[in-house]
Image (cartoon, rainbow, N blue to C red):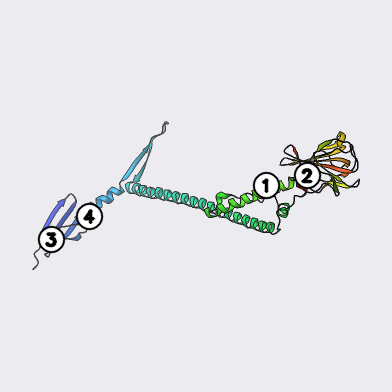
Amino acid sequence: MVDVKTRLSIAGSIIAFSQFSGAGLYHNYFYTAEHPAVMPIVRRGGKVLDFCRIKGWVKNGLTPITIMLIPHSHRNAFNIQIPLFVILITLILSCVGVVSVFSMAAKTAEYYRLQDQVGYYAREFQEIRSSITALKEDELTFKKLFSLGSRKAVLENMDISDSGSIDLEALKLDMKKTIETVGEIKDYLHEQRDIHLSTPQGPPTNGHVSSFFGVRQKPGHRYREFHSGMDWAAPSGTPVTATADGIVSFSGRSGANGNLIVLEHGRGYSTFFAHNRKNLVKVGQKVRRGDTIGYVGSTGNSTGPHVHYEIWENGHAVNPATYIKYEE
């Protein structure tokens, strides 16, 4: 026989009673005026699921909140009623949306940062590739030049055109020294080529030396004088050629020198060609070594067809014989 104890409580329109059936179980029954049906629940250990409290929560959640808007004009105020749970859900969704927006913004910023970094490395690799290509071209050029055998051939066949600047910053540390060395070699070769082209070489005409550089007896006189050049005898009309690259600084009649040509070669060198029958060049004209600039003659104070040839270095006359024999 189950010992049944009945408890009864009345609170407003809600009647609740319970029966104890042993084994620690209470059978609870609720009766309300709104819901006349008896609603049993079972509790264990004295813990009861309070449907009245749940109903209160639901009712509070459905309770509308009135928002009143009062315009500054003479219009009537109007209000909006929104349930509390709608406001709560809206706030929760707004918070989720804000978090999502900030998360997307952070990911977008990271994407652009990575994109810039990839672009930077792509440019670095491209510059390194260009530098490697330039190194290979320079290597081929040097091999071709050094295969010519002589310094003269190397300097005369060297291409002085600029193949493009090498961006040393784009190279790795192990390539930097190599490229600096290549740049130094190219600068050295350019300088040596300029020296080679501006240095007088060879005779001024196809003939023979009739008077050397230094003290000599003046032709037609008994006294001795210093001869500041070399005389090259040749048939009248024999071509007179430039002995180095340069620019014509004088071309015309010059008293006892007859028809005179003066060339400026740079690096402190100047050359003089006197007694020409005819000058073929004008002041300011550029000439290359081997170009014909006039013809052998006997103008001015001359005892016969020849070229009086002088070389001046840094404002002083020097012995042309040294430069006529110069060849490497």
Q: Amino acid at mark 4?
A: Phe
Q: Amino acid at mark 3?
A: Gln
Q: Nearer the viewer, residue 300 or 94?
A: 300
Report, in whole angstroms, how far the alpha carbon at label 1 lies from the one at label 3: 117 Å
Q: Amino acid at mark 2?
A: Pro
Earlier along the polypeptide chain: callout 2 or callout 4?
A: 4
Q: Are marks 3 and 2 in contact (CB under 8 Å)?
A: no
Q: Quadrant of residue 17?
A: bottom left
Q: State the image coordinates of residue 8 (x, y, percent, origin top left).
A: 12, 55
Earlier along the polypeptide chain: callout 3 or callout 2?
A: 3
The residue that mark 2 highlights is 320
Report, in whole angstroms, how far the alpha carbon at label 4 lies from the one at label 3: 18 Å
Q: Which residue is drawn at the image coordinates 19% and 56% (left, top)?
A: 31
Q: Nearer the viewer, mark 1 or mark 4?
A: 1
45 relative to 254 in the view: left or right: left
The residue that mark 1 highlights is 191
Q: Which mark is residue 80?
A: none
Report, in whole angstroms, how far the alpha carbon at label 1 lies from the one at label 2: 23 Å
**104 versus 224 height, above or below:** below
